Image (tube, rainbow, N blue to C red):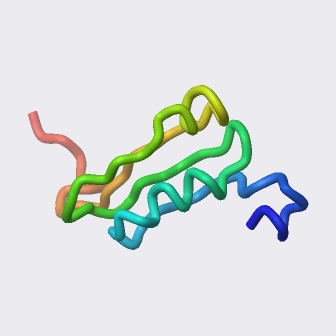
């Protein structure tokens, strides 16, 4: 990705594989101030170097998951 973008990195990385290796891979592929979206469900814990997120790149981390109640209005 760095080569394709002239060293810049991608703007948004959406992780939807559920494979633990995809998380650090995405963090390294992102540009500074990029957006990381975690959309899958991990079956095991994932450990990453938090300095990449806050100190080095100041990334925006978002979580999303399409569950059985997604998009339905809340009752009550």
The image quadrant where one finds the C terminus is top left
Q: Is residue 55 above or below residue 8?
A: above
Q: Is residue 57 left or right of residue 20?
A: right
The residue sitting at the right extreme is: 6
Tell whether 50 sits left or right of 42.
Answer: right
Label count reads: 0
Where does the image place residue 68, in percent across and percent down from the top left? 18, 63
Residue shown at the point (46%, 65%) measured from the top left:
22
The residue shown at (33%, 63%) is: 40
Q: Residue at x 65, y 33 (%)?
A: 56
Q: Nearer the viewer, residue 60 or 75?
A: 60
Q: Nearer the viewer, residue 68 or 46?
A: 46
* Residue 53 shown left or right of residue 46 in the figure: right
**x and y percentages locating residue 41 in the rendered image:** 26, 62
Lateral position of residue 67 relative to residue 28, left or right? left
**The residue positioned farthest toward the top in the image shown:** 55
């Amino acid at each position: 990705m760095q080569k394709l973008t002239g060293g810049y990195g991608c703007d948004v990385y959406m992780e939807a594989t559920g494979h633990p290796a995809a998380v650090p891979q995405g963090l390294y592929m992102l540009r500074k101030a990029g957006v990381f979206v975690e959309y899958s469900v991990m079956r095991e814990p994932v450990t990453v170097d938090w300095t990449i997120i806050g100190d080095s790149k100041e990334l925006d981390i978002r979580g999303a998951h399409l569950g059985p109640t997604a998009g339905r209005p809340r009752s009550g």
